[in-house]
Image (cartoon, rainbow, N blue to C red):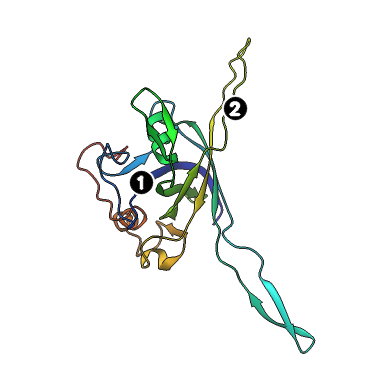
């Protein structure tokens, strides 16, 4: 189950019912999803934490008798070499003010996300989040000198319970392997991204 690399990260905006927003103006593309890829664009890091915590042991008759396990609180630390500016603002919940700027609006939008990596044997591994929030806590800037000072985009994704009760059995996280005989990529994409349907053209960015 050990993995290597980050193959890609895909985002989608979903509405309050858990359905994909397949609209380039209201959402982020005509099909609702955005695969972060292209000239200079792509993920350099996607570290998933908070999937489980050690349970609380309860004792009786001088011995451990029961373990209480809490809910999942997944978070993903993301870093991108680059990402489309306008799409990132929408994913964070910023709104264009019509004067060339973007301002933060609440409540934040519902964001679905799929992280794609590979096992050492070359098998595709997918980690899905059907609902959550994307946060950019700050931006770092450094002066250029005889070397260019780059500042990659760093984000935090907070996974939340799905908006549809039957998605992921009500859990905020689901993992797939393409080696499973029942694996269906089309069905996986529709489950993660609230009924997403692939377009016949321009499949890379939605």
Specify whether residue 123 is in view: no
Residue sticking out furthest to the right: 62
- Label 2 neighbourhood size at 10 Å, few (<14), some (14-19), many (20+)? few
Q: Residue 7, relative to residue 168: is it above or below?
A: above
Q: Residue 35: tell me if it is visible.
A: yes
Q: CA distance from mark 2 to mark 1?
A: 26 Å
Residue beneath the point at 28% across and 55% down: 195
Residue position marked by numbered label 2 in the rendering: 140
* Residue 61 vertical placement versus 99 (above, below): below
Judged from the image, the secondary structure of the residue bearing numbered disc 1 is: strand
Q: Is residue 116 above or below residue 160?
A: above
x then y, percent, for residue 117: 47, 47
Residue in front for this viewpoint, 140 or 149: 140
Counting residues from the start of the chain, the first of labels 2 and 1 encountered is 1
The residue drawn where x is 34% and y is 52% is 193
Q: Quadrant of residue 61?
A: bottom right
Q: Is residue 90 left or right of residue 2?
A: left
> In the image shown, does 101 or 79 lie closer to the viewer?
101
Q: Residue at x 59, y 56 (%)?
A: 50
Outermost residue, top direction? 146
Q: Residue 168: horizontal and vertical position, in percent?
A: 41, 64
Task: Give 156 or 5, whichever is nearer the viewer.
Answer: 156
Snapshot quadrant of residue 98: top left
Q: Tell me if 62 is positioned left or right of 149 in this view.
A: right
Q: Label 1, on which residue?
A: 13
The circle drawn on residue 109 is: none
Q: Position of residue 118 (x, y in %)?
A: 48, 48
Which residue is drawn at the image coordinates 42% and 48% (left, top)? 113
């Amino acid at each position: 189950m050990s993995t290597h690399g980050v193959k890609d990260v895909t985002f989608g905006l979903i509405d309050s019912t858990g359905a994909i927003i397949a609209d380039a103006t209201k959402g982020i593309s005509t099909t609702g999803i955005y695969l972060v890829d292209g000239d200079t664009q792509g993920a350099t890091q996607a570290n998933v934490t908070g999937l489980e915590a050690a349970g609380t042991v309860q004792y009786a008759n001088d011995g451990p008798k029961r373990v209480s396990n809490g809910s999942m609180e997944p978070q993903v630390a993301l870093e991108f070499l680059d990402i489309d500016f306008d799409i990132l603002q929408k994913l964070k919940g910023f709104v264009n003010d019509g004067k060339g700027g973007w301002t933060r609006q609440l409540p934040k939008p519902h964001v679905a996300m799929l992280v794609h990596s590979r096992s050492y044997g070359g098998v595709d591994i997918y980690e899905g989040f059907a609902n959550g929030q994307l946060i950019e806590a700050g931006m770092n800037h450094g002066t250029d000198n005889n070397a260019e000072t780059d500042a990659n985009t760093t984000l935090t994704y907070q996974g939340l319970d799905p908006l549809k009760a039957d998605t992921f059995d009500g859990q905020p996280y689901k993992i797939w392997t393409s080696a499973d005989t029942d694996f269906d990529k089309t069905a996986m994409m529709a489950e993660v991204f609230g009924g997403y349907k692939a377009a016949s053209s321009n499949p890379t960015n939605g």
